[in-house]
Amino acid sequence: MTVSVTYKGKEMNFDKIPTKSQIEKRYEELYGSIKPYPRKKHYPLLPSQEQIWFFDQLNPINSVYNIPIILDLDGPLNLVALEHSLQSIVNRHEALRATIKKHDGDPIQLIVDYLKLKCRIIDLTQYNIEEREEKCNALIEKEVNTGFDLENGPLIRAKIIKKEIDKFVLLINIHHIVFDGWSVNIFLEELTEIYHSYHENQDIKLPEISTRFTDYVQWFNHRLQNGMLNEQRNYWEKELTGNLPKFELPTDFIRPIEQKYNGDMREVSFSGSITQELHNFCKLNGVTMNMVLLSSVIILLNCYTGQKDLIIGTPVSGRTKEELANTIGYFVNMLPARFHISENMSFMELVKYVKEQSLQTLNNQEYPFKSLVEQINPDRDISHSPIFQTIMTYVNISKIIELEGIKVKNLPVPGKTVKFDVGFGFTEDIEGLKLAIDFRTDLYSCKTINLLLTHMEQLLNSIVKDPTLAIDHLPLLSEEERHELIDGVNQTTNPLPKEYCVHQLVEKQAKLYPEKIALKFEEKEITYVELNARANKLAHWLRLRGVTSDTIVVLLCDQGIETIVSMLGVLKAGGAYMPLDPSYPVKRLNYMIEDSKAKVVLTQSHLEYLLSGYEGERFLIDQDWGKIEDRSIDNLPTKINGLNLMNVLYTSGSTGVPKGVALPHQGVIRLVYKANFANLNSSDVITQLSPLNFDGATFEIWGALCNGGTLVIIKKEIVLAPKELCLKIYEHNVTTLLVTTPLLNRLIEDAPESLTPLRRVIFGGEIISKLHIKKALKYCEPGTLIHTYGPTENSFTSCYFPIR
C-alpha cells in the first residue's frame, strides 16, 4: 500500500501510514538544505564522476573531457591582479584542488587544503605578427588537446600568452570531472570581481560558499543509496521502455567499429530580428527559449532522418538547491529526453508537447544517467554512445566579463574532441543568438554540418513567420538552395539535339565501328554492320505493315540476339517496342496487348500459342527472316524526333491492373549517352541481366549499343548463380554490371572477386547493408559501386550515389 502525504506543499509517498517525525525526516531529506558533513581524508565520487573516471581508465590522460576557457584580453592587464584572482578562485573552491585516486579498487577524490596554481606567462612579443599568431594558435591547440593526470593532478591549468604590450590571451583548462558549464559562469564572475577588488585595492564582495562540493557529493549519494530517488528512477524506466531508437543522421563516412572522439565545430550567428521574434513567441506562449530551440532541433533531425521517435541528450545543472548556486564542481546530469512526434503536428503543438516533456524531465532530473544506463541495460554497441548519440544545450550568458580598462572576448576552442556524434550548442549573449554544432569528424564532413546550420537558420525564419504550420510544411530551404536543387544540380542538358533518336545513335556506331562485335549470346555474336542491316530489313517490312510514329509493336520473345535486332528494327520503322514476359498468364498478356492497341506482334514459333486471342499482324523472329531477305539494308529516313515514343513497359500497377509506362527517345538518350552517373564509351562491355520488360534492360541494351560497346546477353540460370556469373564477367571482360541489391549482396557474399575487373556496378531497388559495402570495397575501387534510384516513368534512374 502506498500512502501519499502532503507536507508544506510537497507530496511524499510512504509504504505505510507515517508518524509525524517520519514525515518531517522525509521532508528534510528530500527538500531540506544540505547540512555540512565532517571533513574526511577522502570522499566518494558521484555516479556521473565515476562514469568519467571509468572512461579515463580506458583512455588514460585523454582530452575528451577538457573544458577550456579562452579569453582575448585587449588593454593594460595587471598580471599580478590576474594571477592573484586565479589563485583566489582555486582557494575558494575545493573541487579545483581535487585529485582522483584508487582506494581498495574504487575511485575516491582527495582534496588538498592548498594548491599553488602555476600560471605560466609566455611572451611572444619578440616575434613578428604572423609568427605571433601562428605560435599563439599552436600553444592554444596544444593545451586544449593535452589531457590531465587525474591521479596526480592538478586538474586545472592556466597560461597567459602575451602577444603585444597590451594584448594577451588567457587560457584556462579544467577537467570536467570537477567542473561543468554552470561552473564556467561562476569562475568568470568571480574572476571579474576579484580582479576588480585587487586592482582597486578593495575588499572582495563575493557570497560565502555555504555548501562545499564534497558536502553535496555525500548528501547526494546518501539519497541515491537509500532509495530517495526511486520514483525518478521509475519515471525513466517507463520513459525508456521498448526498443530505443539509434540516431540515424546519414553519415558521410563509414562508421568505425569503435567510437573515435576526434571532432570539429562549425557555428552560425542568427540575426537580431530572429532572436527577438523567438523571444516574442516565448512570451506569448508561456514557453522558454530552450523549449523552442529544442523543438527546432527535433524538426531538423526528423527531416534529416525520418525518425519519429528521437532521444536527445539534454543537460540539467543538477543544482537543485539554492545553496549550490555559487559552488564550482561537477553537478550536471545528462538526461535522455525522448520525443514521439507526428508530421501533422503544428509547431505550436510540438512546442506544447516539448514543454510537457521538459517539465517532466526537470521533475526527475536528479537520477544519475550512469545509474540509469546500468538499470535499463540497453543493447551495447561500441560504435555508439548508449541511449542517445546527439545532445542539445542552450546557455544564456547574461553577464559580461569586465576587467578594468580591458576589452574581453571569448575565443573559439580549436581542434576539439567530442563525446557524441553531433551536438547542438545554442548560446545567447549581448551579441545575439548563436548555434555551434560540434561533430565527429570520422562520421561527418564540414559540408554536411554547414548544411545543418543553414537549414536551422531557415527553419527558425520559417517558425517565426508562421508557427501554426505543420512541422513537415516548415520550409528548410532558402531560395538560393531551392534554385540550386531544382535548376543547378538538375542540369541535364544533353549535347545531342532533342530531335535525335536512339536508333540514330546506333546507326552512328555502325558507321564508326562496322566490324566490332555488338551482341553476344552463348556461342553466337553479331557485328554492328550486321545488326544494322538486319534491323533495317525488318524496319522496311514493318513500315509496309503500317508501323509509323508512336505505333506500338509487341515483343513476345525469349532473350537472344534476334530479340535485340527486332527492337532496333521497330525503332527504325518509327514505332515503339513493348516487351512482354512469356511466363505471364495468357489472360494478362492478352489484356496488355489489347490495352496497348498494338498493331504488330513479333514473337517466336514456340510462343505463338500465347496469342490465341490476337488476330492482328505477327512476325516470327525465329522463322520468318527468309520472308524479308530481299528488303533493303539501307537506313530508313527518320520521320520522328526525340519526343516520340521509344518503348512501352507495363508495370504491375498500384491497383493490381497492369499499367503501361511510355518512354520517349530523349529520355532514354539522356539515360545512356554521356550520362553523368555512368560515362559509357566504345570500350565498355555491358551485361544484359534484366528481363526485357524491366526498365533495367533499357539501360543495359541501349547503354551498350548507343555508345559502340558490346552487349553480352546472360541466361537467367547464370544470373542467379554468382560463381557462374563471375566466370562470365571474366570471360567477356565485362566492365559494367547492372544488378538489383539482393543480387549484388549474393555476389558480394559468394563471389566478391567478380567486382574486381568492373568499372562500375550499378544497383538499386533496396538499401544495402554496411557490412556488404565494407566487404565489396575490399575487391573494387572506390566509386565503382553506384547506388541509383528512379521510377520507370523517369527512364530508369533519377538520382545516384557513388560509394567511396
Image (cartoon, rainbow, N blue to C red):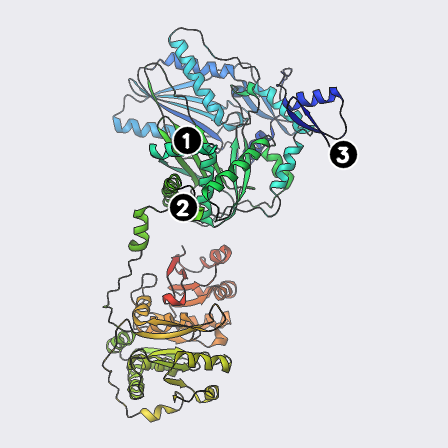
Percent of width and height locating residue 616:
39, 88
**Is residue 247 among what the camera can see?**
yes
State whether residue 228 is above or below residue 513: above
Residue 127, image quadrant: top left
Of the residues tagged 1 and 2, which is closer to the observer? 2
Q: Check disc 1 and report its element: helix, strand or loop.
A: strand
Q: Give the label on residue 474, or none.
A: 2
Dot 1 or dot 3, earlier in sequence: 3
**Is residue 618 among what the camera can see?**
no
Percent of width and height locating residue 95:
54, 21
Percent of width and height locating residue 551:
33, 80
Question: Which residue is rendered at x = 48% and y = 76% of the image?
Answer: 716
For the residue pair 274 and 63, the one nearer the viewer reads as 274
Q: Seen in the image, is 637 located left or right of residue 716?
A: left
Question: Which residue is rendered at x = 45% and y = 36% of the image?
Answer: 292
Q: Give the label on residue 427, or none.
A: 1
Label 2 environment density (alpha carbons within 10 Å; few <14, some 14–19, many ≥20): many
Q: Give the label on residue 206, or none.
A: none
State whether residue 676 is above or below residue 382: below
Dot 3 or dot 2, earlier in sequence: 3
Three-letter residue code for mark 3: Met
